[in-house]
Structure formats: C-alpha cells, structure tokens
Image: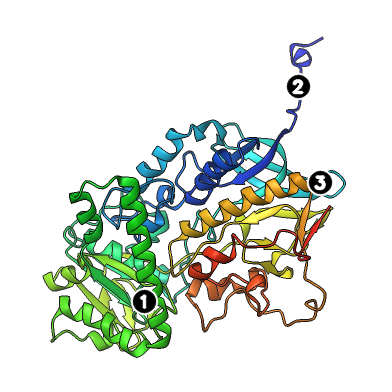
Amino acid sequence: MTATATLSKPAAQTSQHFDVLIVGAGISGIGGAWHLKHQSPETSFVVLETQESFGGTWLTHKYPGIRSDSDLYTFGYRFKPWVGAPIASAEEILKYMGEVIADDHLDDHIRYGHAIKSAKWSSADNTWTVEAVRKADGETVTFTTNFLWMCQGYYRHSEGYTPEWEGMSDFKGQIIHPQTWPEDLNYTGKKVIVIGSGATAATVVPAIAADCEHVTLLQRSPTYFIPGRNENELANTLRELEIDETWVHEIVRRKVLFDQAAFTKRAIEDSDVVREELLGGVRAFLGPDFDVDTHFTPKYRPWRQRIAFVPNGDLFQGINSGKASVVTDEIDRFVENGILLKSGKVVEGDIIVTATGFNLNVLGDIEFEIDGKALDFADTVTFRGMMFTGVPNLIWVFGYFRASWTLRADLIGDFMARLLKHMKAKGAKRITPALRPGEENLPRLPWMDPENFNPGYLMRGMHLLPKRLNSPDWQHTQDYWAEKDEIPAIDLDDVAFDYK
C-alpha cells in the first residue's frame, strides 16, 4: 500500500444546530444578539459574519472622514447610553459596538469569516439549512436553525455603484469608489473630483480638501443638508446637572425623536417653508453672494431623500476656504485629464471619486429555497417590511430612512423575542405570513412609493424587492413614530400568521 493510499479523508463535519441564526454582525446583528440574550435567554443562537470583525458599514467603509449622518442618541441602541458628540466617526461607533459585545460576552456567539451561500427551508423538518464558506480554510460548513434573522443590511458591501460613462478608459488618473477606498491612495497635492451629492460626498470633500491642491464636488443635481454644531445642548445641560448617563441618553433620545417627528410632519405639510429654512442654514455659511439656488437647491421637496447633517458646516467651510468648489452640471464624457461636462467645460482632476451610491441587494445575495423551489423575494408581499408571504420563520431588519436605522432594529428585537415566546406557548414550529381573505386580489405595489422616498439606489433596485399593499400591515411605512406603538401591539394570533 502506497503512502498516498494510507491518507484517510477527514470525516465530513456534521451540521451545527441553533434555535436562531443571525446573519450579519453589523449594528442590527449585534443588537439582535443582545435582545436574544436579554429577552430570550433560553434561546440558542449564532451570528454568522462574512467579515473578519464586527461593524458592517463601519468596518468595511474606509474612506476619509467616514461618520454617521444621523445622531448617535437615536442611532445608538436604546439599552446602551451614548456619551459622545451626536455625529460620530466610524472609529467611535466601532468602539461603542465593541463595548456592547464585551459587556454581554456576545463574542461567544459570533462566527467571523463565514460567507453564507445558501439557505434552504424544509417544511418536513421545520428548519433552515444554511451553507457557508469558512474563509480561513475555504471549507463549506453547514448550520441548521429554526429561525433566520436577517441583519445583513440592504446593499452589497463588496462593491459600490459606479455608472458607466463614456471615455472612462481614456482618463489617465485613478477612478475609485468610496466603498472600496484604497488604503495607499495618495491625494496630497492632487486635483480631485468627487462625483455625487449625498452624505458620502459631503464627508469626503472636507476630509481631504486640506491636503489636496483642490477638490471639486461635481453633482448632477443638489441635495438638502442641515449644517450645525456637532453637539447637543440638552445633553450638555443634563451633564452639567450631573444627571446619570442612562437618564441623559433616554431624555435626549426622546427630545431628538420629538423634534424629528415635528420636522418630518412640517416637511410634508409646509414643504416650502422648510425648504427655505434648510437653504437659509446653507446661506448662513456660504454668504449672500454664493449661488445657493444652483448648487444647493434641490428640485424635490424636503425628505423625499435622506437629509444629511453637516457637522460644524465643514463642507461649506471647505468651499469658503477656496480648497473646495462645487459644480452642478451633467457629465458628457471622461477625458484624459478629467471630465467634460454637457456645458462644454472641462473639470480637471488627477483622481476621480465616484460617490454615486450603493448596489442594493436583497437579503445578502444568498440563494434561498423553500422546499426545493428557488425563492424570488420580488414575488412575495411584505408584512410590515420584516416578514414575507410564503416564507416561514424569517425576519428581516430594514431600518428607517427618515430616522435612525437602529430604532427599527430595537423594535424588531422586541417583536422577535415576543414571537418566539408566543410560538413556544402555542407549541408551533413554524410561522408563515399569508394575505388575509379578501386581500389576495388587492394591487401589488412597489416596495416604496417614489413620491414618498426615491433615492437612486432604491429606484435602481426596486424590482428586486418584495411588493407591498396599500395597507400599513403590508408595507414598510418608514414611519417610526407610528411603528413604535403599532409593532408592539401586533396581534400575534392575527389570521395573517399561519402557524404549524
């Protein structure tokens, strides 16, 4: 017998079983793990994360200046006081999340470097079988679970969205997307063009302007911004009074949410007034001679797209300093030394940054099957933006656009814990949302009404998303102020839930 023949093949690894499998160790997944540990301590669970550490967006995005575009008193968890400035850097957010993990030993439940490839439901066994590739050795590992909790976000982390412009191959410099920012990118003394008008562009421009020869913010159309000081006066006052940080967090959180609700209502009902208030904030930084009408006055009403907070007006300070400028025009084509605009002007650049958005994906680009049949989520109708008709034992965290993502992660954490207890009490192994009698023939509408919210990444990927009905139960309303009362009041014995 040869030496080769004596080598035995390693035994196949048996699958590991958990009551709940959480997909993703970002802000939603870590929050979900906390809720299970505290509200459903008898539940076994595991968190599978593709990356080598926790953090999601705050780990994978490395572009200069990366920060939150919403305040941390509401973006932070309700159970973990935030003690820093309202707008925080990625580093500060990662530190905060790390403290949540350490405080409750959540690391014991997280498997890093596990890229999920497929999830297959068996009605015969009432289980999901999840296959993942372990990056450390390339081996495929198998997990079975009673319930899937999808916390992977809504866009593809591996690549951002960059349109195809004519002449891109003619450009002699570098073209990069902020989502895959090279660690060794040298922009010192260079001319940089940042294409885009959203929060990412508004972050990158002031972060690099001081080191560049010049930065040009090139946008097809403007967006709204809220410039202001990166501090919360109420929090400062409460701390001066030596109020406990837990109380500070809750009081400030409630005040921020109260103010946001009032602002959202006014943005819809008194949009012209709110528009002038927002533009007034920009004019206060840029002065009366700057062409705010051209460069910072959107064509849509406030809150039809997300509004980013600009801490201390740093974007506008960069423009005032002369190190940055803004050009509002359409791209004709790329040329050797920059970009030719439809107006005939050439914007020169050594580096072009395409801050042009995300590639939306649905449930992590995972191949789903239900009893051997491939699942297309676009064929389903969503229950409250978190469950789907015909899909058993699955919850998805999709946060808010007009309020902090984490607010909904906390609400769904409560719902999940309550649902697991209810199923145990009923002796049910399976829950599947189903349209009620009389609802089957109602019009099936796109996931989001474009008149309500219409960012580019959502419009590009709408066909991939589940459908909605014209009913609060069968859509993601994006209304935290209603859902904070409605989700806890969901009747778990509603006929919309089919238990087995």
Measured along the vertical axis of the image, is residue 115 above or below residue 310?
above
Residue 280, percent across and down?
22, 82
Amino acid carrying mark 2 in the image? Lys
Q: Name the residue under label 2.
A: 9
Depth check: 175 or 66 in front?
66
Do the CB atoms of the residues marked 3 and 1 lie less than 8 Å apart? no
Report crowding for label 1: few under 14, some 14 to 19, many 20 or more residues within 10 A (C-alpha).
some
Measured along the vertical axis of the image, is residue 258 above or below residue 295?
above
- Residue 91 shows in the view: no
Amino acid carrying mark 1 in the image? Phe
Q: Name the residue under label 1.
A: 263
- Describe the element under mark 2 as helix, strand or loop: loop
Q: Name the residue under label 3.
A: 126
- Residue drawn at the location 20% of the way across and 56% of the way down: 237
Q: Distance between the residues labelled 3 and 1?
A: 45 Å
- Residue drawn at the location 20% of the way across and 72% of the way down: 316
Measured along the vertical axis of the image, is residue 306 above or below residue 174?
below
Q: Distance between the residues labelled 3 and 2?
A: 32 Å
Measured along the vertical axis of the image, is residue 357 above or below residue 343?
above
Which one is earlier in the sequence, the residue at label 3 or at label 2? 2
Residue 335, percent across and down?
34, 75
Amino acid carrying mark 3 in the image? Asn
Which one is earlier in the sequence, the residue at label 2 or at label 1? 2
- Describe the element under mark 1 as helix, strand or loop: helix
Q: How far apart are marks 2 and 1 (CA)?
A: 64 Å
Question: Which circle, 3 or 2, is nearer the viewer?
Answer: 3
Quadrant for the N terminus, please. top right
Q: Quadrant of residue 75?
A: bottom left
- Residue 136 shows in the view: yes
Depth check: 86 or 367 in front?
86
* In this picture, residue 263 sits left or right of residue 157: left
Residue 199, percent across and down?
35, 67
